[in-house]
Amino acid sequence: AAPVAIVSGLSRAARIGVVVRDGGALERLGRARTVLLDKTGTLTGGRPRVIAVVPVAGASADEVLRWAAAAEQLSPHVLARALVEEAGARGLRLPVPEDVSEEPGRGVSARVGGRPVVVGRYPAGMPMPEAVRRVEHRATLDGAAVVWVLVDGDPLGAVLLGDPPRPDAPRTLRRLRSVGISRLVMLTGDREAPAREVAAVLGLDAVRAEQSPADKVAAVRAERKRATTVMVGDGVNDAPALAAADVGVAMGARGAGAASEAADVVLTTDRVDRLADAVTIAVRTRRIAV
Ligand code: ADP
Ligand code: MG
């Protein structure tokens, strides 16, 4: 490897907001054949927006949104930001949450006004009343993300959010293929239906939905047996998978880089197409280097 080429590759990347940890990371990126991409906040999440607020237990839509947004005030998750923004747009006053904890890939728990509130995926293992099933079904038809709000352990309602692919995502994936990436896979904590909806638009080779952070790590390890593997993600739920990949790439523009510490490459602008730029630079650098 020619050190001069590597230094120039690193600085070319830095000039467009792509921070590569070291020459080794750049070389591995130039050898990559497989790219695994998180969905929410990476392939999507330019701007998720609230489509509907659906009460299931007699509360008003604004009450459902108020509990959800109150609990989510401290979360950097893209869906959380969208809920808080919508509450602001509706002029809702949000009480300060206490004892907030966030479980990556699931949601947040907190106490709001002294009452336990859970916001996120419908809790696994909890019975699903007919009204809850209907909302899940509607979300499936809409390809929407669903955020449930449970107060005192009972479902109060859900917020449906549209989370379309980033406008620069299709082009990014085409460019990746043109510089030698032969396998593109989505890894998402989200459910099957919205995952397939986004994947169909983008033309991915495979989709794995309902992935816990540990599942994402297992998927990375399996891919690494076949080829040099890049994992791209934005959230804390992606951090272990980024660390397990040959090259971990973090979307680092928001939330002070929830995934950035585990990454070899940080995209500091909120554009996924910088990923294609980074791989292109890495491939060219490698050609000069060998
Ligand atoms: P991805 O892997 O696609 O980035 P995440 O693992 O971040 O998705 O989230 C998966 C699902 O978990 C989301 O679609 C949402 O239903 C739920 N979720 C995770 N974090 C939150 C949160 N802070 N607020 C609401 N829902 C959340
Ligand atoms: Mg994500």
Image: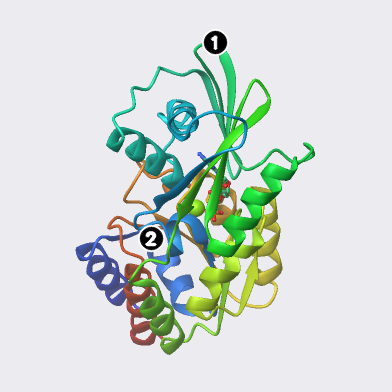
Instruction: Judge by depth and name the residue closer to the eye, 290 or 215.
Output: 215
Counting every numbered tag in the picture gives: 2
Question: Residue 109 placed where, x, y %?
Answer: 58, 27
First reached walking from the N terminus: tag 1 or tag 2: 2
Query: Could you tell me the amino acid type at mark 2?
Result: Asp
Per the image, label 1 sits on a secondary structure element best described as loop
Instruction: Place residue 164 in its image quadrant.
Output: bottom left
Question: Residue 259 placed where, x, y %?
Answer: 46, 48
The quadrant of the image that shows the C terminus is bottom left
Q: Residue lying furthest top in this view?
A: 114
The quadrant of the image that shows the N terminus is bottom left
Visible residue check, residue 55: yes
Question: Residue 173 placed where, x, y %?
Answer: 43, 78
Q: How far apart, in angstroms, are the residues tagged by discs 1 and 2? A: 48 Å
Residue 78 relative to residue 238: left or right: left
Visible residue check, residue 1: no
Instruction: Judge by depth and name the residue closer to the eye, 123 or 213.
Output: 123
Residue 117 relative to residue 264: left or right: right
Provide the residue designation for mark 2: 22
Question: Residue 16 placed where, x, y %?
Answer: 22, 65
Q: Residue lying furthest front in this view?
A: 58
Residue 63 relative to residue 34: left or right: left
Provide the residue designation for mark 1: 114
Instruction: Judge by depth and name the residue closer to the eye, 1 or 124.
Output: 124
* Label 1 vs label 2, nearer the camera: 1
Per the image, label 2 sits on a secondary structure element best described as loop
